[in-house]
Amino acid sequence: MQLTIITDLNKCVGCKSCQVSCKEHNTSGAFGTVPDHDPYTDPDGMWWNRIVGMESGEYPNTNVLYLPKACMHCYDAPCVPVCPTGASYKREDNGVVLVDYDSCIGCQLCMWACPYGVREFDEQQGVVKKCTMCIDRIEDESLPEIERQPACVQSCPTHARTFGDLEDPDSEVAKLVAQRQGFTLLPELGARPAVHYLPRRQVPVILDESEVLRIMEERY
Amino acid sequence: MRPTGPLLLITVLQGVSGGLVLSVAALWWLMPADRWLLPMGLWGAFVIASVGGVASLFHMHKPKAGRFILRRLKTSWLSREALTTGIYVPVLAILVIVPHLLLVAPFWYGIGSVIASGLALIAMYVTAMLYATIPAMRSWHTPLTVVSMMWVGLVAGTALTEARIAIAIGGHPGGPLHLALLGGTVILAGIKWLQYRYFSEARQAIHASTGTGMPAAPYRLIDSGTTKLPYRTQTQVWPSLEPGRRAVLYMVMGLSLILVPFVLEVLPMGPRAIEWASAAGIMVCGAFIERWIFFADVTHSSKIWFGDELQRPSSVSSNRVSPDFARRLKQVGMHRHDGL
Ligand code: SF4
Ligand code: SF4
Ligand code: SF4
């Protein structure tokens, strides 16, 4: 079993509700806290899920793309073998990569080893923290079934994120990856992320020069 | 990434200590006249390595969990570093302290120098491998990292040994170790040049426009995800060095680590001792500058999602047309109005 989250980049509108709900849940959750010691004057606190905004393409054929970026729960997670204390580990039963704060010495070697820059250092506690796939929610049997999914998945207003087992061919995530050419980030670094993205389907370019000139004339 | 004091101290001092041990051990076996240097050299190496070792404890932000540090010897170079440096320093301590307490056989130092040299080489190699085996650190992921880290330590340690001889005899140390030091400094210049090129290539290969394997490149970052300089919680990256500042730093490193010590060591005049002592001192300072750059100028693969790279103006968000497009507008008889 390998739990994962698939994000459809056609649906993500960059609203950051997954980023905020991740922080909201994990600041109060069992795996918290996601510290924010001076939130009003220093928003550069800790986020386990950051939405990167990018403008892509060349003018005039450009568009904006949002990339939610949290732990990829890699199959060959490079953050795990480098950890000297075994604090970083990958669960064999569901493939989730976690950090045991009690045995973490805060050396940050795992942060250097993670290709995606999704681990964050908590200066106050002296340990490294990161996305837990909301393990405290998905394994909490006191929650109703519908609630047993990551906070970021549940809060997405456009349903861009889907949660499930990548190794179950009948799961929705496995089907999405197979049917929609799901891809991973920086595959050349060999971490084999479990988290996949569904590529944007480009709207065919129907803009030619006369069209641009017409619009410019109308506007100016 | 952010260069921190403990990282600089452990990596530089461990290397210098190793260089010192290897050079005095070489003298013991090759130049019997200089055997008096070995006990002193071992003492020096022990003190230097101990300072580095103590400094490394401050790199642990939660020392209480330090008791688990040997758990991952099978896979973690940091576990191995704790083990190898943890053996090297106590062995040095035994080698230098026991002769003050007991009468030791004449071969004590001879055998001891071989054991200490072996342990020093292993510890230096393991420390260097810790950095060279991280694929995400694009500038470090090369055997050059191992060669460079070990060579800096060997050359700087040898310079200290030569300075001690020069002070003792009040003149030019000469001999094969002197030639080795001069040759080693020249080779060091070559290694640093190659490493400079590798760092530059890594830097140029990692930027937002290379994207993430997605179509519709190039990309321009407009929001790196609620983070800002100096990326306090994301210590794998650090604000990119300004090109001017980088050039000055590399120049200072070249002067202090290589050129000035080399010139001082070959100058055929003056009271030799002071020149040699200065050469060694300047070289050790150069080793610290070299290591600072090693950390500060490294490129991490996640840098593609951080916005402090060279800015490429966006013709969309600035609402400005390209000169070429403006020319074509003119050609078809349209004119630029205010705001265009
Ligand atoms: S994304 Fe980074 S932190 Fe997460 S499993 Fe992969 S290497 Fe580890
Ligand atoms: S910071 Fe903690 S989790 Fe990361 S490598 Fe060091 S001990 Fe392991
Ligand atoms: S799975 Fe949970 S911890 Fe991970 S990004 Fe989503 S909300 Fe945050």
Image: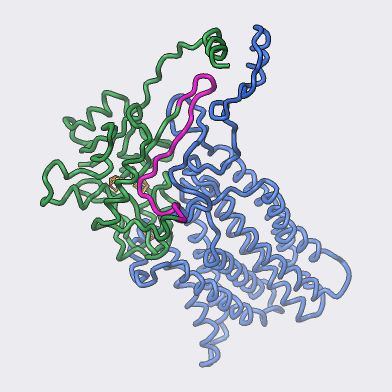
**Direction from residue A214 to residue B154 in the image, left or right:** right
- Rendered position, B283 above or below B310: below
Instruction: Locate residue B208, reporting x and y percent.
Output: 51, 36
Q: Magenta stretch: give its range.
A: A41-63
**Direction from residue B339 to residue B208 in the image, left or right:** left
Q: Quadrant of residue B106 in the image?
A: bottom right
Q: Which chain is green?
A: A
| Residue closer to the observer: B249 or A141 | A141
Figure quarter occupied by ligand 2: bottom left
How many numbered marks, from 0 up? 0
- Rendered position, B12 above or below A62: below
In the displayed image of the protein, which residue is found farthest to the right? B269
- Chain B colour in the picture: blue
**Direction from residue B13 to residue B133 in the image, left or right:** left
| Residue closer to the observer: B28 or B153 | B153
Instruction: Name which residue lies at 38% across and 57% down.
Output: A36
Instruction: Locate residue A193, reporting x and y percent.
Output: 34, 40
Instruction: Locate residue B276, reporting x and y percent.
Output: 77, 71
- Rendered position, B304 above or below B80: above
| Residue closer to the observer: B156 or B182 | B156
- Rendered position, A7 above or below B23: above
| Residue closer to the observer: B257 or B322 | B322
Q: Is residue A46 magenta?
A: yes
Image quadrant holding the N terminus of chain A, namely: top left
**Direction from residue B335 to residue B50 in the image, left or right:** left
Image quadrant holding the C terminus of chain A, namely: top right
Instruction: Name which residue lies at 21% across and 38% down.
Output: A164
Instruction: Locate residue B152, reporting x and y percent.
Output: 63, 60
Q: Is residue A101 magenta?
A: no
Q: Quadrant of residue B82 in the image?
A: bottom left
* Colour convention: by chain
